Image (tube, rainbow, N blue to C red):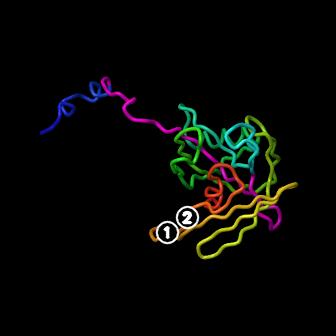
Amino acid sequence: MPSKEHELTEEEFLAQYDASQYPKPSVTVDTVIFRKIGAQLQVLLVKRGNHPCRGLWALPGGFLNMEENLDEAAARELAEETSVSTDLLEEFGVYGAVGRDKRDRVITIAYAALLEDEVQEKAGDDAAECAWFDLRTHITADRLKIELKGATEILQAEVSWQISALSGRARSKEIITSDLAFDHALILADGY
């Protein structure tokens, strides 16, 4: 037997709809920006200026504004934090593990781009610094080791990964170790 809800028009249903019944996670966007200098692949990172993870290196990104499309938010956050602008951003993954951010339930949509030109970065917004890091990887059947060499420091991460039976694509599963903020080692691994 249909409920009384089925007897309502859409306008009547929406007028009585209570969105507060459903908890809402926060939504962010993160960007993995690569460039090639000669044969060397580099990735752009920002040093977080605010808590949580203040002082740790992270991927450029931030919170979605309610009036923005996801790709607009990714481009805006990238430009605000690094002064780098590109229209080459491509969505490649969604990350929503419970506890991935200490502030709230946060789901992030990840974007990547490979820049052809040498671009200048400049830290802005809540980024204390931004810099290009040389990216080196070591791949085994079930692990990806990442080394990021900056001007003054070396960051390392290791993630487990597996090949998807459906798509044939490698996907990160779990962080083994990471010098990066949040779950950005997973996002970087998948972007790579």
Picture coordinates of residue 176, whole percent (x, y): 63, 63
Give left or right: position of 101 versus 21: right
Quarter in which the C terminus is drawn: bottom right
Other-residue count near label 2 (Cα within 10 Å), few / some / many at <14 / 14–19 / ≥20: some
Q: What residue do we see at 77% from left, 37% from top?
A: 124
The magenta stretch is 15-44
Cα separation between marks 1 and 2: 7 Å
Q: Amino acid at mark 1?
A: Ser
Disc sitting over residue 75 in the figure? none
Picture coordinates of residue 120, whole percent (x, y): 83, 47
Residue under numbered circle 2 = 171
Picture coordinates of residue 160, whole percent (x, y): 59, 67
Vertical placement of 126 versus 162: above or below?
A: above
> Which of these two is toward me, 138 or 66?
138
Residue under numbered circle 1 = 164
Give left or right: position of 29 versus 24: right
Count of marks overlaid on the render: 2
Q: Amino acid at mark 2?
A: Arg
Residues at badges 1 and 2 in contact (C-beta under 8 Å)? Answer: yes
Q: What residue do we see at 56% from left, 55% from top?
A: 92
